[in-house]
Image (spheres, rainbow, N blue to C red):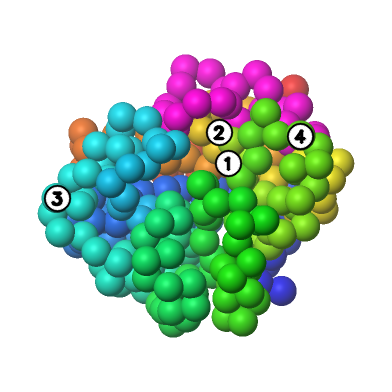
Amino acid sequence: MSALDDLFARCRGEDRAALIAYLPAGFPSYQVAVQAMTAMVEAGVDAVEVGMPYSDPLMEGPVISAAHQASLDAGTRQADVLRTVEAVAATGVPTLVMGYWNPVHRYGFARWAADLKKAGGVGAITPDLIPEEAPQWLEACREHDLDPVFLVAPSSSDERIAVVGRANRGFVYAAAVMGVTGARTEVGKGARTLVERVRAQTPLPVAVGLGVSNGAQAAEVAGFADAVVVGSALVRALADDGVDGVRRLSAELAQGVRTPDRS
């Protein structure tokens, strides 16, 4: 069993969803990003996605896109992403990289997988990659015992969901709404239906992302999903209120997933 398998088994035993939180490496600096991610863990986050800054993050809304650019402008490189993974993994929580494929392709599939594993990473989420175009990446993940995570969306066919379910390890990332990332005033209405469709195709846990911004929304999603993924709201908290803001929001979200709304 992987660290993610262990995490989801523990959360099932506690009758709750897991909380997976995202921040980009190097924003606003390497040191502050690590401090913020550590604060998330201390506040109750169960797993961390370390964002790999990229110049053309097609899925991201304005908050995360601006953070990516600021990180790149500050000089963040792949080595800094891996250093961030190492620092966060040292807290004891499963740590993944969330990254677009072009930088990994340039780095080299096998080399990236080896270095990610060496840094303590447990896997990678690749939002712009599909399993059919990833044979070398999947082989590298098998060789280094990493969990590859691909995405599904409300527009995904049942056949596409089945393909992702067979390729993924750890969990399936379900993008709850169509469009770019960003905190929203309400959870996408199709999220529950998408989770049901995924569960019909794979036994893997389903993590719902895109849109959650507060504890009440986290509790709502925790009522029907295996994990709640939060990114934009935490990036905004870091930009507006620093590490303390991230800590406060993380604690609120952690309370939400621990009190799921199953109404």
User: Cα distance, mark 2 to mark 3?
Assistant: 32 Å
Q: Is residue 139 left or right of residue 51?
A: right
Question: How far is the residue under mark 3 from the one under mark 4?
Answer: 39 Å
Q: Earlier in the sequence, mark 1 or mark 4?
A: 4
Mark whose residue sits in front, 1 or 4: 4
Choose between 222 and 179: the one closer to the eye: 179
Q: Is residue 82 left or right of residue 138?
A: left
Whether residue 39 is visible: no
Give amino acid for label 4: Ser
Q: Earlier in the sequence, mark 3 or mark 4?
A: 3
How much space separates mark 1 and mark 3, taking CA atoms? 30 Å
Q: Is residue 179 left or right of residue 248?
A: right
Quick check: marks 1 and 2 in contact, CB under 8 Å? yes
Q: Which residue is mark 2?
A: 218
Start and end of the magenta stretch? Answer: 176-197
Numbered disc 1: secondary structure: strand
Residue placed at 71% from the left, 59% from the top? 167
Nearest the viewer among 193 and 249 is 193
Residue name at image x 37 percent, y 30 percent: 61
Read off the residue under disc 1.
228
Counting residues from the start of the chain, the first of labels 1 and 3 encountered is 3
What's the mark number on residue 157?
4
Residue 185: say if magenta: yes
Three-letter amino acid code at the position of disc 2: Ala
